[in-house]
Amino acid sequence: MKHIRGSGALSTKTVPPLRYLKEARGSSVLVKLKDGGEYVGVLDFSDNTMNLILKDCVELNENTGELKAKHGTILIRGSNILFVSLNYTGER
């Protein structure tokens, strides 16, 4: 959240969360699904309903974080997403 000074009062300007997704294109992200699944890949596309396309995607074991499967390019439906971690480095 940015704070902006104007006309003597401190006001706040909120940034829509989807804007962060659009700015994160081309970077590594972790996507946690509502069913517990975890996917890491390079964010290639996002839309207004948070549908995501990840390239070079791998699925991680949700308990250990170890590699479970390699998927390549996948589409994740936005309604299945619990959260997205931007600029993911592999650290838990």
Image (cartoon, helix red, strand yellow):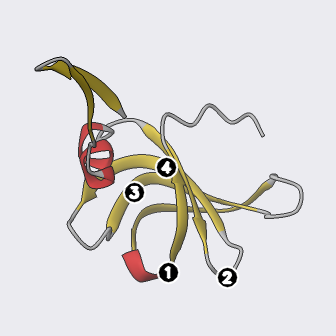
As measured in the structure, the alpha-carbon distance from the residue carrying label 4 to the one carrying label 2 is 18 Å
Badge 2 vs badge 1, beta-carbon distance below 8 Å: yes
Q: Residue 48 vs residue 52: left or right? A: left
The percent coordinates of residue 87 (x first, y second) are 49, 34
Badge 4 vs badge 1, beta-carbon distance below 8 Å: no
> Sequence-wise, which precedes: disc 1 or disc 3?
3
Q: Quadrant of residue 67?
A: bottom right
Report crowding for label 2: few under 14, some 14 to 19, many 20 or more residues within 10 A (C-alpha): few
Identify the amino acid type marked 4.
Gly
> Sequence-wise, which precedes: disc 3 or disc 2?
2
> Sequence-wise, which precedes: disc 4 or disc 1?
4
Badge 3 vs badge 4, beta-carbon distance below 8 Å: yes
As measured in the structure, the alpha-carbon distance from the residue carrying label 3 to the one carrying label 2 is 18 Å
Q: Report the disc number at residue 80.
A: 1
Element on which disc 3 rests: strand
Element on which disc 4 rests: strand
